[in-house]
Structure formats: C-alpha cells, structure tokens
Image (spheres, rainbow, N blue to C red):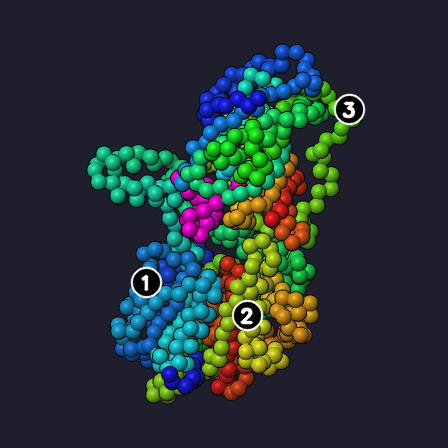
Amino acid sequence: MADIRDAVIIGANRIPFARAHGAYAKASNQDMLTSTLNGLVARYGLQGAQLGAVAGGAVMKHSKNFNLVRESVLGTPIASNTPAYDVQMACATGMEAIGSLANKIKLGQIDSAIGGGVDSISDAPIVVTDALRGIIMEANRAKTTGQRLKALAKIRPGHLAPQAPGVNEPRTGLSMGEHMAITADQWGISREEQDELALASHKNLAKAYDDGFFDDLVTPFKGVDRDNNMRADSTMEKLGKLSPAFGKDLGDQATMTAANSTALTDGASAVLLGSEEWADERDLPKLANFIDYEEGAVDFVDGAEGLLMAPTYAAARMLKRNNLSFEDFEYFEIHEAFASTVLAQMKAWESAEFCREKLGLDKPLGTIDRSRLNVNGSSLAAGHPFAATGGRIVATLSKLLHGKPGKLGFISVCAAGGQGITAIIEGR
Amino acid sequence: MTRTIDLPNLSSLYRRAALGALKSKLSSNGSLRGLTVEPVVARHPGISEQQVEDYRRLFAGEAFDGAHRGALPSVLIHIAAFPVQMGLMSSKDFPLPLLGMVHLANTVEHHQPVMPNTSLQILVKAQNFRAHRKGTQVDITVDVYPQGVDVDSADQSELLWSGVSTYLGIGTFVAGKPEGEQSRRGQGGFTPPRKTAQWNLGAGAGRDYAAVSGDYNPIHVSNLAAKALGQRGMIAHGMYSAARMLEGREPESAGHRWSIEFEAPVALPGTVNFAVEDISDGTQRFTGWNARKNRRHFTGELILP
C-alpha cells in the first residue's frame, strides 16, 4: 500500500441557502446539486475531467433519486466516466462524504474528488401511507383481475392522506428541537447566551459577505446571491421579543426560539479535493489539508445522553489520536443546529466532571476562545440544508486557514440519531 | 372448583355487556362476605405469528424473527389471556357490570419465555373485592400455564406468566362504602420528570390497538360510545401504554416483573410525555403524563431478573 499522502482541499462552491418554500421552492435536489457542481466545474476548469469520485447525498431524498449524485454528475461537463455515489448520515452527510473521500486520496486510491450534499425542504418526498402502499403492492402481486380488485377494494379514504417525511426522532417521537431543549435545560444554557450566539452568527456572516469572503465560494442561483435567512440588522432586543419555539413544557425556563434555532432551508454545496500532485498538474489552489475526522454516536433513546452531543465524544477521541488540544486550533467551526447545541458542547468540554465521567479524560478539554468560533457565521445565519452544511463549513474553514500554513481548524457537526462528526483541517 | 370454558369471543361479550349495562347485576344490596366467583380456565391455541407481526408493526418494535428474538412480549400474553378475563367478568356470578369498568393497575410476573404457536392454559380468578369511594375494586388474577399441566394442582415452577389486573366497577358498592378515603387522583403538586420521549397518538390509536388485540371495547374506538360511558371522547387502551413503555426493554429469557398504575386516561387524539428513569441497577421507572394539563396518565416499573 502507498504511503499516506496529503488530501488537499482545493476549493469549493455552493449556492446561497434559501429559506424553505421561498426562492428555491420549485428546484429539486438534483437541480440544486447539479447547479452547484456546474459552478465548481466552471471555477476550477473541470470540464471533461475524469475525477476519482464524486460523493454526497441528501437527507430528504425522493426514492426516484436513488442515484442522486451520479445523475447530477451526468448533468455536468465532468467526464461521464467519473464514478459517483450517495452517502447519508443525516446532518453529517456532507462531512462523511468529504472525510471518506479525503481518506481515499490519502491512501492513493484516487487522486481527485468532489464531496458535498444538498437538501430541499420545499420539495420534500411525500409518500403514501404504509397501509395504501401495502394494498397497492398486493394488487401488483395479484395474478387475476379479481384478486387485483379484491385488493384495491380494501382502500379506505383514510389511506389516501399523503405522508410528509417524519421530522421526529423515530425512537423517541421528539423533534430535534425538543431533544435539544432537554439538553439545554440540563446544561443550564440561558436564553441570553443563545441569542448572543445567534446575533453573532448573523453579524459575522453579513460582514464576511460584505468583505467579499464568499465571492469565490458561492454562485448565485434563482436570483439569490446571498443566504436569504441572514438578518444583518438583527439586535438582541429583537431576538429577545420572540416566544419560545421548543421546550415549551419547561414554562418560563424555555429558552429556544425560532431565532436561536436554525431555520429550515434549501441549498447545496460541494468541495473539490485532490492530491498535491493532481492540484499542481492543473495549477489549482491548495487551501488546506484535510487532516482527520471522527464519527461519534451516543445512547440518547432513554435520555442517557443528549441527542446532539455525539461530537463531544468524537472530539475527545480525535484530539487524543492526533495528540492535540483546543489550544492548538486557530479556528473552530461548530455547526449551529441550535445556538444551545454549540453552547452545550462547549460547556461539556469545559466540564471536569463530563470530561472525566463521560469522555474518560484526566482533565477537561478546555475552553474555546469565542473570538475564534464561527468567525464568518454559521448555520443560524446561513441556514442549514441538512446534507449541504458539511460542504459549507469545510469551504469556509479552508479559506480562513489558507495562507496560514500549519494553522489548524476544528469542525463539529451534530446529526440526527444521536450521531456526529468532528474533523481537523490544516492551513497551507 | 375451576370451570373449563372455551376461549371467549370478545365482540360477542361486548355486545352482551352493552345489553347488560341497562340492568343492574346486583340482586341485593350485596356484601363482601361470601362474594365468590368461580374461577375459569380456557385453552388458548397459541399466539399466531401473524398476531406477533401485527403487534410488532403497531409498536415499530423489535423483529421477532424467531432466530435472534422469539419470546413474546409480556403484553401480547396479556392480550391472549384477556378474553378469558372478560369471560369471567361476564359470567352470571360476577357482581360488577362489565361496561364502564375502569382499569386501575396491572402487575405482571413474566416467569418464563412464551413462544408463538405454543398452546396455553389460561386460569382466571376474581379475588379481593374491596370498597373504593367510587364503587368496588377487584383483582383479576391470570395464570398462564403450558398445555398438559393440571392447573388446579400445578406447581409455581410450571407457571409461565402471571398477572393481576385491578379494576374498579364505578357506582356498584358490592363491598360497601369506604369511610374517609381521599381521592387517590388528587395529584397535588405533580412534578414531571425529564421527558425522554413523546407519544403522538392519533384518533385511530384505539382502533389500531383493537385490531391487534381484539379488544374493541367501545370506549377506545368510538367517540359516541365513549361519551355514553362517561368519557369526553375515546381514550387509549391502558395496555397500549404498558406495551409502549415496555417495548424493547424485556429480556428474551424472561424472569422479569413489571407493573403499571393508571391515573388520568389518555384522550385520543393526544400527546403523552414519557420518561424512563433508572432507579437502580435493573430497575426502571416510567411515567406518562399530559404536559399541558400537568396530569399523570400512568406510572410504571420494570424489574429485571
């Protein structure tokens, strides 16, 4: 086997993220992903290029999109002999796609790759009830017209109601927001600190746009040129007026509002990776190296751990393996599923008890310097089209670290099902 | 003496009960002394794989594939025995009217694993009639034995499953009226535990459980009938809550005990907040409640062997 080599993050592209049922209401996942890939192709001259692999996915996916990424690639000028496949790990889909592609590059299995993701709330897969599907399938299996009619005669009006995709955790019946409200309450996360984090996200993202930071990371789509969930003019006073949206049964202890929780959005992202040689041959930029990533999962079903706390465990293992501590990082990107998710993870890493009892560490992982956290905004402002978030974060962090060789960036992305991913990126 | 009966048909029992509800079953003012109901035993052909599959789908639970898991969940054995309970409670010598009877509590000792398609003997007794401020309470004990055992002389070691269902016959004071007993359901100052799950029950939850259990008690499947029986509308089966609370927690090798005590009924459609707490090693406590009204629906406990 070849020696481990660097997996280089060359560049990225995404379309602006748009609030659900708005600007992208009529765009499909395939439309958005294809457009995103086209933007990446145009930016890095990938027309006709045969890549090692393209991987990505969507959390909310129509069954007809069984080969979503391959079909999207076929709609671009990327050479059609480029293999492509779908990945799905809920909100960590994009991170899993990018991380596993980076590993393949490191091992020398492939020289180039695109990883990313897409999600649409506006074009979510609506399906028929289990009962109706059972009847239709029975009719389909019938050998005679009589049998078929007999099966179809079982259809009742109640069977005809369309079924939207479930938004609740299947094993608890609780929405992600309700789960997070429990964790936020356990960690004593205040309304004020959540609103402060949300406000910082909007301010930071708006400033980054104004500074032109996203000029070579974002391509307009359907007339949208900036994430349209962003509220540059938001204030603590405005945020403070909102009523709680989650954890309402906590009464006056409820802290989570629509503003300090991520809005439902549509969008897509893609990141171009390659070996050093591949980038050099094509005279492409080398923003950063993808150093390592770690998946985590927790037992959340009976409340032993918070649904979105898996990254705290993944981080501990990943840092130990790389012999690093938080002090070694220049920037931190912690996905803002909810403001309280970021705050709870940080409190956990600061807690001697949590780090000892749960993470098995001698001392706490430590405090994350707020001035290094989500410095160009995160999901609260940009929005969070589930599978597209990993690509957005990797792109932002890689560009932040570009020109700072050896400086490290930390990523944490939580996901449904009590899972999560953490990653390390190094500037170059 | 134990009377052997055929496995009763639940729907015909409910029809008879509806007619019987019009007349009081009490011929005299009744007294606790000498109140005896002849125990009954019935043979059950075994719980079918189809019923197991229907149960599994209803609770989206573990696959009972017969290879990695074959033993039946405890509530499915209750379901198998329920017609015999109902048969006894419909018998002429049972003093309380069947319809409108309120299920107060259930305790179960699940001694040994029970597999599908295994014929069973179900022995049911009515015991411990006692006064309640709203009527008369009674314990219906259910002992489930394998085929070939003489239930009248059977040894405890031959018992597969035993349960006690406590019911309240409202308005029938067979055992007199208790003095000075306060309402058990006052629930003053109920502080809910931290929820771990939420059950979102649709209007059809009662009908869905009825389709699996055969228990088409009108109070669970029809708003009109439920109103006639003194509820505001349909309520969930108590054993539906028990089944959900136990789902995925029962050991394959059995030997566990569990109990559930019902308080405010679960109105359908409705949302139940649910919490599981580890009390000690091998003991879990469950609570179901209505967050909006701050009323407890049930508390339960599971003790592993």
Which mark sits nearer the N-terminus, 2 or 1? 1
Q: CA distance from mark 2 to mark 3?
A: 62 Å
Q: Which residue lies under the disc numbered 2? A: A314
Q: Which residue lies under the disc numbered 3? A: B179
Name the residue at 52% across, 48% down. Answer: B253
Q: Position of residue B190 (x, y in %)?
A: 71, 42
Mark 2 burial class by Cα count in 10 Å: few <14, some 14-19, many 20+: many
Name the residue at 59% across, 40% down. Answer: B109
The foreground one among A326 and B45 is B45
Residue B266 seen in this snapshot: no
Mark 3 belongs to chain = B
Does residue A412 appear left or right of residue A44 in this picture? right
Q: Secondary structure at mark 1?
A: loop
Q: Amino acid at mark 1?
A: Asn
Location of residue A319 (image quadrant):
bottom right
CB within 8 Å, label 1 to label 3: no
Image quarter of the N terminus of chain B:
top right
Query: Furthest residue to the right?
Result: B180
**Labels 2 and 1 positioned on one and the same chain:** yes
Mark 2 belongs to chain = A
Q: Which residue lies under the disc numbered 1? A: A67
Q: Position of residue A294 (x, y in %)?
A: 50, 72
Q: Is label 1 or label 3 in front?
A: 3
Does residue A253 appear left or right of residue A403 in this picture? right
What is the number of the mark on residue A208?
Answer: none
Name the residue at 57% across, 13% down. Answer: B23
Q: Amino acid at mark 2?
A: Ala
Q: Amino acid at mark 3?
A: Glu
Q: CA distance from mark 1 to mark 3?
A: 73 Å
Mark 1 burial class by Cα count in 10 Å: few <14, some 14-19, many 20+: some
